[in-house]
Image (spheres, helix red, strand yellow):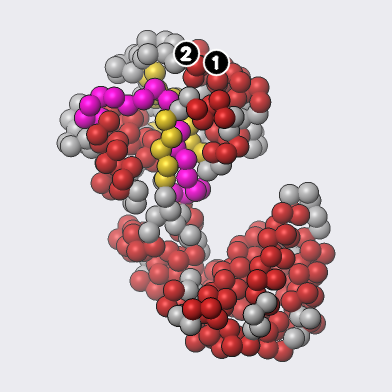
Amino acid sequence: MAYYVNRTMFKHLVGNEQVKQTFRRLIAKRRVPNSLLFAGDEGVGKRSFAVELIRSLLCKDTTEGDACGVCPACRRAGTFQLPKPDDKDAFKKVIFSDHPDVGMVVAQNRNIAVDAIRHLESEANFRPYEAESRFFIIDDADKMNDSAANALLKTLEEPPAGSHIFLITSRADSLLPTIRSRCQVVRFAPVETTEIERFLIDDRAFTPDEARLAARLSRGSIGRAVSINVEQVRKLRERMLLAVANSLETHDRAGLLRISEEMNDAKNKEFFEESIDILTSLLHDIWSIRVSRDPSRTVNADLADRLSSLAESSSSQDIPDWLGSIQEMRENFAVNINRKIATDALFTSMSA
């Protein structure tokens, strides 16, 4: 499976302008730290920024800190052939890009193998083949177990002068404090909705209406926005809006349980979590309208009139209670609670 970062040059990456400026200053001074921790929400572009930083340090024709994106070093550095998910042995090694001095460690089945970190330690001590330094990305670094984390710690304590290690994580707090303390942290913020909207229209051929909805649902994540199937979202949203109406207006418990049945049907299994996310966004919007009387700030702004009507039907405690129940249900999923029973219980409480 190929992985290729084709968004060349920092100026083409969406959002986090402050991070871009920081990287450009470090590149200009040739003072990029040996260990960096890229921390921020899932899908905000951390991996793409890491690859672009590497490109800018490899490129022989940079302009104001930006890589050219077309020279052999730029193109090879961002091209990885990732192994098949069932190829266990391949995940026990650093996966090198088409450039021999750029490698990446990737998790398999939610775990980063200690063997891969030990291989990184070995490779980091080799002299560069072509470049002035070697570069290693640890993707989803929070997926290291204790053995892998301790193996990495040994490398971070005595970093090889000719190597750079970049950790990517959306859960920085789950990393060992000793690892965090040995890295310079680069924090990534959610991308502004308007920037995501513009990107979807200009680069992904979304219509303005599709881009507006996807950008608002993305919660600041470019990755999430790109993956949203707007047509599917609208179908799921229609069902979740009916569930809210059944709760607030008609108190139709039977109707709610039918929706629960549909959500948990085998053919809809893959959309269950997305449905819960959409239900949550609708409830947040209704609560926001009730409190602020300003429907323009909602995620589902195209449904402003309907949501305003539902806000009028809600009590001061309905929505906070339901949102709390949804959060509790999500936490219970971590211990393998039955989804159908949990959804039935949620909708029954919402119909009371």
Residue 334: which disc? none
Identify the secondary structure beneath mark 2.
loop
Residue 220 found in image quarter: bottom left
- Residue 32 inside the magenta-drawn segment: yes
Residue at 54 percent across and 15 percent down: it is 154
Tell me: residue 48, above or below residue 294.
Answer: above
- Residue 58 inside the magenta-drawn segment: no
Residue 330 found in image quarter: bottom right
Tell me: residue 276, above or below residue 314.
Answer: above
Residue at 35 percent across and 48 percent down: it is 16
Q: Give coordinates of residue 320: x percent, y percent.
A: 65, 71
The C terminus appears in which quarter of the rendering? bottom right
Q: Alpha-carbon distance for marks 2 and 1? A: 7 Å
- Dots 2, 1 in contact, CB < 8 A: yes
Neighbours of disc 2 within 10 Å: few (<14), some (14-19), many (20+): few
Q: Which residues are magenta?
A: 27-44
Q: Which residue is mark 2?
A: 158
Q: Is residue 205 visible?
A: no
Residue at 21 percent across and 30 percent down: it is 28
Tell me: residue 157, above or below residue 165.
Answer: above
Q: Amino acid at mark 1?
A: Lys
Residue at 51 percent across and 48 percent down: it is 42
Q: Amino acid at mark 2?
A: Glu
Q: Give coordinates of residue 192: x percent, y percent.
A: 38, 59
Q: Is residue 214 visible?
A: yes
Q: Which residue is mark 1?
A: 154
